[in-house]
Amino acid sequence: MSVKIEVKDVIKIYGDKPELALKMIREGHSKEEILKRIDQTVALQGVSFEVEEGETFVLMGLSGSGKSTMIRCINLLVKPTSGSVYVDGKRIDAMDRKQLREIRGEKIAMVFQHFALYPNRTVLDNAAFGLEIRGMPEDERYKRAEDALEKVGLLGWRDRFPTELSGGMKQRVGLARALAVDPEILLMDEPFSALDPLIRNEMQEELIALQNEMKKTIVFVTHDLDEGLRLGGRIAIMRDGRIEQIGDGRDIVTQPANEYVERFLDKVNRASVLRAEDVMTSPPEVLGDWETAWTAVKKMQRKDMDYIFVINKNNKLVGVLLLEDAIRLVDENEKNIKKMLKKPEVLEPSAPLAEASSKILNTGIGVAVVNEEKNLVGEVSWREIMEIIGGSR
Amino acid sequence: MNLMLPLMQALPKLPIGRAVEIALDFIIRTLMPLFDAITWAFNGTISALEDALLFLPPIALIVFIAVVVWLVGTKWLALGTSVGLLLILDLDLWGELVETMVLVFISVIIALLLSIPWGIWMTRSNTVEKITVPFLDFMQTMPAFVYLIPAVMLFGIGKVPGLFATLIFSIPPPVRLTHLGITQVPKELKEAARAFGANERQVLTKVELPLSIPSLLAGVNQCIMLAISMVVISSMIGAGGLGEVVLMGVNRLDIAMGFEGGLAIVILAIVFDRASRSLGNYREIRTRFKHKEKEVKR
């Protein structure tokens, strides 16, 4: 994997005195101070990051955090006041207009928040827009636009106009228009924010599925951390034109860099990013399969357990014994526990937590976490799940 | 008032009118050959077009106009057009009608050729916008009769000064509506075009102009209407046509003649107005053609 996009210390100032504002930033004056004293708006104050080839990189922030300005600096719809942007190692903010148009037309495509479809063009002509700009003959560009529409499932609508489409369908056309030029980089500026929650989920899933197949480099802007976590790549959290933290979903959920990042986590569905190993505890007690029913009852009663995981001499998990079954064995004077063993639900340490919760719901007891050698490494019980949902972890 | 009087006497009246007069006089004296050439060229074009249209049998021209109206509008509009034009033919005003149509047609073409680029230019540069807006106000609000004087001085009596006065009067609305149409195109749509590598020309031809077509057509419609309304006024300097019929009716207090001339102008105006408005159903026309194309391909 190589670095596809490199952003180095980008500063963007809106106003008529950028030089002065730049000087003030370098002297350490704050954004508010610059706005107050010389009436210049600082949109980005030194942003740096790298995006690997094939990665889905999320820029997350509230409105006014500079995320939309930042994504526009990548195809230079917004020209950085200072700093540099490299795509494939070439510095694009120093390119002349012609080179820039070429790179925009062939390498980088963009999807917009409010779709930005042309109301006077049919779905097909909208999807073929990028190719038309490139000057491709009609037959060829329609063929490629049709392929792109097929990918997003809208081929049947090719002769309709955008006003006849629902929001979700419009954004599919927006996506098809971007895919039709077969770009290496896809810039997505809050593409699903204007959609209903249900449609949004559906579109996110589809994007993930498409991305698994296409392996494009995606820069995705969102104000919704849940959405960012769902897409599964690295996330940069922005505030006031700065990056507060960069990391993958787990890093951010488990080790928020500061209070600001933490505040987002309150509203986030942690179960979607955390893994079994992040929340598992070691079972209070385990039982050897050579031990008797009587020992099992004693062990469970001592630790107030309803069930106990059973391992063999090689430390491998062989089953789970419920307290009621153990008591019945004792009543029947049966020492051997093996025939009463149940097959427990198991998870790998890297399994997502969402899977654990559904398994717990199925069985009503904890889920065993086992490694590749089938050794018991921990368990996820109701208690952990409730704590995550309740937000105390 | 008493206080104002000595003040008024102390200040001389600014000789604005006199200055314009002198400037015009200078222009006429130095550039007369140029204006003569323009007059000659336009007179030639106008009479050639008139001759060509009068050469056709009136019925053929009526059928042709009705078919064009049908293509852009509805069959009812086409029917109404034919009835109206037949009425004018019946009133024995056909020659005057053709004269007026030719004058309107040529002035509208020239007005649009000037005003649309002007409107586009205004969207590209704030300075141009600031400078030209007062000019447009001036052109629109100055009473149209005032244009007749310099028009006659520059081009003499006849159709060409009528054309000149009509042009000045009918240029501002399409300029403003072109400017309005383009500035109303959502920013995101222009940005999207640039994001896909469009150059400035492509942004204009593929996004801005197509999306401002409703506004542009409103400009065309306004231009045509104003040109027709100038017809009566410019008949005062010998532009001929239906306006002259009305003018004669007024001069002779001949109600019958004045009314018939006026009615013919109304019919012409309604036909042009409805037909140019029907052009607004641009998308419909486009899809109609698209479907036809597809059928042809199959």
Image (cartoon, grey):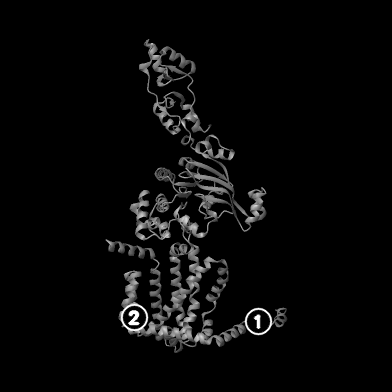
Q: Quadrant of residue B30?
A: bottom right
Q: Which residue is mark 2?
A: B87
CA gap, disc 2 and disc 1: 53 Å
**Which numbered circle lies on residue B14?**
1
Q: Position of residue B206 (x, y in %)?
A: 43, 62
Q: Nearer the viewer, mark 2 or mark 1?
A: 1
Can residue B31 be seen here? The reply is: yes
Element on which disc 2 rests: helix
Vertical placement of residue A86 versus B271, above or below: above
Query: Counting other residues with Cα less than 10 Å from the Cα at mark 2, is it few (<14), some (14-19), or many (20 or more)?
Result: some
Q: Earlier in the sequence, mark 2 or mark 1?
A: 1
Residue B77 lies in what quarter of the image? bottom left
Residue B143 on image: x %, y %: 53, 79
Three-letter code for the amino acid on which mark 2 is drawn = Leu
Q: Quadrant of residue A133?
A: bottom left
Residue at (44%, 17%) from the top-left corner?
A287
Amino acid type at image mark 1: Leu
Describe the element under mark 1 as helix, strand or loop.
loop
The relative height of residue B191 versus residue B71 in the rendered view (above or below) is above
